Amino acid sequence: MTWILLAVAVALLLIRAYRNTFDVHTQAVTIPLQKSTRMKDTSSWEPLSVLHLSDLHMENLSVDADQVVSKFSAQPLDLIAITGDLLDRQKNIPKAVDYVRTIMSLQPALGTYVVFGNHDYVLKAFKLRELKKSLEQLGCRVLINEHVTVYHHGQPLHIIGVDDFATRRSELEKSFQHVPETGARLVLTHDPNIVLQMKDYAYDYLLSGHFHGGQIHWPRPFHLAKMGKLPKLNMVKGLHEMDGRPFYISEGLGQTGVNIRLRSRPELTLHTLVGATSPATHYEPAAFTSSLSESAATLVIE
């Protein structure tokens, strides 16, 4: 009888964990640009809206692209950022490309930007080239240790794509090479552990993913201990700070291994970078926790 009850309890838990993969959470974070020698006056900076998706994992994805479009169709977007792990298997390249195509129908003013993650690099080299070429044919800009400068209401924005840290492909010096001194700097990367090596590289905000918020975060995500130093600092999701600069870790949209989540949810995040309009406007870190308060940043959870 005990074994039957245990089996029923496990089955119910797995059903709940599977249903969680459909329960996408939409978050909004507002970050003031840092006052630095690069941007002495940020008061003229128009708010920049960035829709952030990460860890799509086509093999285990319960959130339809049309659902994403529906959530943000009424929201003017400046930029879409996809921070890696689109897929695990080469057969899903067309599926990943179609998903991104649908997302791009939101028509962000400054375009869509992609960096690759460790799971993307499971693909054979020629298949990864196929994925990259297909994304670029859609109009995406795939950044591999490089940057691109765009202009947001006349103000320069440098989008810096740092390649995957987990697979030792990050090249910070190359990524930041020739980035102009003036203008805002937005870094896109997959594995946030790279922030531990970025003390000498100036940026205003960094977007990442990789940890899935633990995915199976029960009772604690002990399995993340092998994924770098940040999990040991309890930095596995949400807004944090390193060396005085803010960075964000998305819980991702898809799952890896098995299509379940416990104490984590698929995530879509709308980031807004605003100018510092007064000396009182400032950013404070989230005290290295997975939840944020209004004093940490403007945060809305739907």
Image (spheres, rainbow, N blue to C red):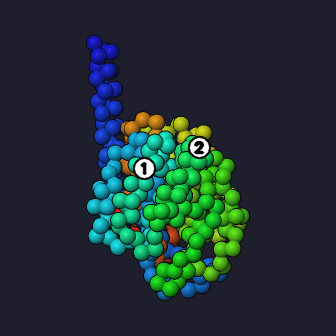
The amino acid type found where label 1 is placed reads Pro
- Is 136 located above or below residue 36 in the figure? above
Percent across and percent down for residue 244 are 61, 66
User: Which residue does the image show at 44% across and 63% down from the upper left?
Assistant: 138
User: Which residue does the image show at 51% across and 80% down from the upper left?
Assistant: 151
Q: Earlier in the sequence, mark 2 or mark 1?
A: 1
Percent across and percent down for residue 221 are 49, 39
> Is 23 on the left or on the right of 126, as rendered?
left
Image quadrant occupied by the C terminus: bottom left
Q: Which residue is mark 2?
A: 124
Percent across and percent down for residue 161 are 59, 63
Q: Is residue 38 visible?
A: yes
Pick the residue in front: 181 or 285: 181
Q: Is residue 237 visible?
A: no
Helix, strand or loop for disc 1: helix
Label at residue 94? 1
Dot 2 alpha-carbon crowd within 10 angstroms: few under 14, some 14 to 19, many 20 or more: few
